[in-house]
Amino acid sequence: MMNGTGAGPAALQPQAPGPLQVLVLWADDSSPNLGVRALGRGTAALVRRVWPDAAITFVNYGHGSPHLPMGRLRSLVREQVTGRRGMQKWLSGFDLVIDTRSGDSFADIYGLKRHTIMTAVAACVRRAGIPLVLGPQTVGPFNSKRGRLLAKGSLSRAKVLMVRDAESADAAARLGRAVDVQSTDVVFAMEVPQVEKSRDVILNISGLLWNPNPHVDFRSYRDIVTRLHDGLLAQGRQLTLLAHVLDPYPGVGTQQPTSKDNDVPAIREFLNSAQSQAEVLIPKDLDEVRAAVASGNVVIGSRMHACLNALSVGTPAIPLAYSRKFEPLLRDLGWQHTVDLRDTSTDPVAAVLHQLGADAMAGDLAALAENAQRLLLRAEQALRSLS
């Protein structure tokens, strides 16, 4: 995949001798959620298109800094008053902060606590006088008055606001802040592995949807996965089951899971209930999952970044969408092959099997890759113009 082509040196300069110091919030390179890892590495790749020698520091839940008490709002407020951890001094040592909001957490659908803490951390960054960029992400939905008020505060603090789809741009505008850049997901900034095709259909089962959740009926989801599995086998397809959110401990696949969000126990339970003989793929890290999806003919994914990882390495993907973050992003890239699990007027299994029988997906991949790089260039140019 080609690098960006932004011309001229970047205006933002380090405060001290050495490389530019960049803090990336709410993404990292070691999360059990491989989508969060893709977000972290993709953001770093985007930054290094502009500043090749930039030093990147990640801060996220489970990947924090002793200077930044982000687990509870009370701890953040206490640190602002006492300064015991040296948070403001630590923050002021960075030249740039890119706030990713985990890609889709600039919303209140995951709870107001998460939204409030992320907003408070952004406020601390601005108090430290450091440029705050809201990196390419989904904005909204906000279903509460408090959620909208918090969002307005974050939007007002951002020196640059980037979104990854047109619907997010509209959501920001309704909150009184026009976006500076409409780009796309940073997964398309990463290098593409060169892998031979050795698998057919790769099906990602989501632990989030397999268990009770606020997005779709988990019983319906289990039925869809089972019927899809059976329908694919009836068509003579070879099937691989893929986890994209992993056990949080070393030795993935052997430890007891600690979160219902985890895909690994969902896959195990499905194997037992369906008596499936499908290959199971539980990758160790982001490199392995990207190589895995590159090896497939097609990916069917309930995790958006399972699909984005596939599309970014040149493998067609059929997303099983459960929230607003899927379709607008993919539509802006020219990808029209999403199946929305919330649409009760259509049988998702029939819709997926229909997409597999169509010829359009392979032809749409080249256009998608071109669109992704064009949209990423906008984000690159916005970073380059910072001063």
Image (spheres, rainbow, N blue to C red):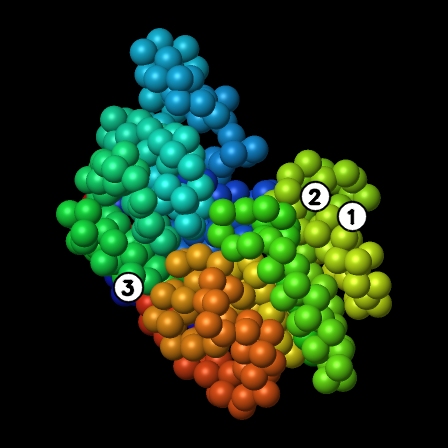
Q: Residue 303 location in percent, x, y?
A: 55, 58
Q: Name the residue under label 3.
A: 166
Residue at mark 2: 247
At a point 59% along the width and 87% down the height, the residue shown is: 357
Mark before the other along the chain sequence, 1 or 3: 3
Above or below, 19 against 16 in this view is below
At a point 77% along the width and 53% down the height, the residue shown is: 268
User: Are the residues tagged 1 and 3 within 8 Å (C-beta)?
Assistant: no
Determine crowd level at label 3: few under 14, some 14-19, many 20+ residues with C-alpha closer than 10 A: some
Looking at the rendering, in which quadrant would you find the C terminus?
top left
| Residue 175 visible to the viewer | yes
Closer to us: 374 or 156: 156
Q: Which of marks 1 and 2 is nearer the N terminus?
A: 2
Taking depth in this image into account, of 275 and 120 the one nearest to the observer is: 275
Judge from the rendering whether residue 192 lies leftward or rightward of residue 80; answer left or right: right
Which residue carries the number 1 mark? 253
Residue 56 in sight here: no
